[in-house]
Image (cartoon, rainbow, N blue to C red):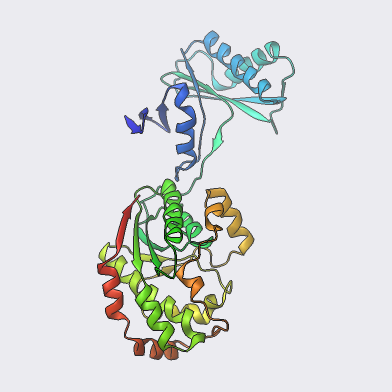
Amino acid sequence: MISRANTKVKFRLTAGRYYLEAQDEQSEIVENILSRLIGISGWAKTTTCEKTVDTVLACCIEEGKKLKERGMKTFKIEARRTDKSFPLNSYDLCCNAGEAVLNTVNGLKVDIHVPQDVIHIEIREKAYIYSGGKKGLGGLPVGSAGRGLLLLSGGIDSPVAGFLMAARGMNIDAVHFHAYPYTSNEAKQKTVRLAEIVSSYCPGIRLFILNFTQIQVRIKENADSQWLTVLLRMAMMEAAEKAALKIKSKCLITGESLSQVASQTIENLTCTQSRIKLPVLRPLIGMNKESIISEARRIGTYEISILPFFDCCTLFSPNHPVLYGDPEQANALYEKLTLAPLIDEALSNCEIIRL
């Protein structure tokens, strides 16, 4: 039994199929959950009936009426018979069911090549009849490909990056850097809301919120302005790696896209990850902004991401940032800042939100 709030669903498994049994009034909730479940190819609401020819044909006729109500004009029948004791084989079942629907439901025609919908018949321990199947997210089941730590900002890109890695089977935690009072509490809550949406696809996210105010102020006061963003990204990578090692994450995940902004040239990306050993996964690296926005709309994060509450990266951005940083120079500048004690302090005082 699976329970979510007041929704109770019976779950069972047979060869090749998972079944969820729920009351009709719970269908919308169940389908909303299934629409966010990574690792399934699709689902459909089914009618079950006794395994007699007359009963199965009657259910197919009812399914044909539903097609007509949805405005469909063409259909075909697909049958699968795993119970070989059923008197009709799959081909005969298709013929008989198609004829029954055509003779009863006016306005429907058979199109076996490009039908608008398909009535499926499955003869198993019961008879299952359905149409109007929904496409699932596909991908690999979350948790089948290890654990990664997502650097989550309040922008458009990083939530999409987290979703894409979850869709490849990775369990996700997230770390967010804020700089109160330079950033508002609304900016922090915006990121929490984004993490909640990503968690609806990848349940159980832990969001680690680090106060980076002292670190940013030290960088701002002691570094050449053109290097501010690169040095800040280096500090974030170092802090994220330390957090990842504590929670046994195998990699870091970022929303960086090649040359999208100044800090994301190949030279600056090399600088920002030069001090860490964990692999950095960048699922958006070859995507353009339009594609990323389209994906953000699809998963439901876009409208929150564009809310006008700025994160620490935005507020401390220089007017003329370095574009092609040299890693040796970047590390020499970074060492002079002596940020390790401040990073450790931020980690020891981090806020953890379990979603």
Identify the residue shown where x is 50% and y is 86%. 225
Q: Is residue 35 above or below residue 77?
A: below
Left or right? Give the position of 134 relative to 171: right
Left or right? Give the position of 323 relative to 205: right
Frontmost residue, 304 versus 271: 304
Q: Is residue 201 above or below residue 148?
A: above
Report which quarter residue 108 is drawn in.
Answer: top right
Farthest residue toward the front?
181
Instruction: Specify whether residue 158 is in view.
Output: yes
Left or right? Give the position of 51 relative to 345: right
Frontmost residue, 123 versus 11: 11
Q: Is residue 295 above or below residue 109?
A: below
Q: Position of residue 148 (x, y in %)?
A: 37, 61
- Screen quadrant of the N terminus: top left
Instruction: Specify whether residue 140 is in view.
Output: no
Farthest residue toward the top?
54
Q: Position of residue 286 (x, y in %)?
A: 57, 67
Identify the residue shown where x is 62% and y is 28%. 118
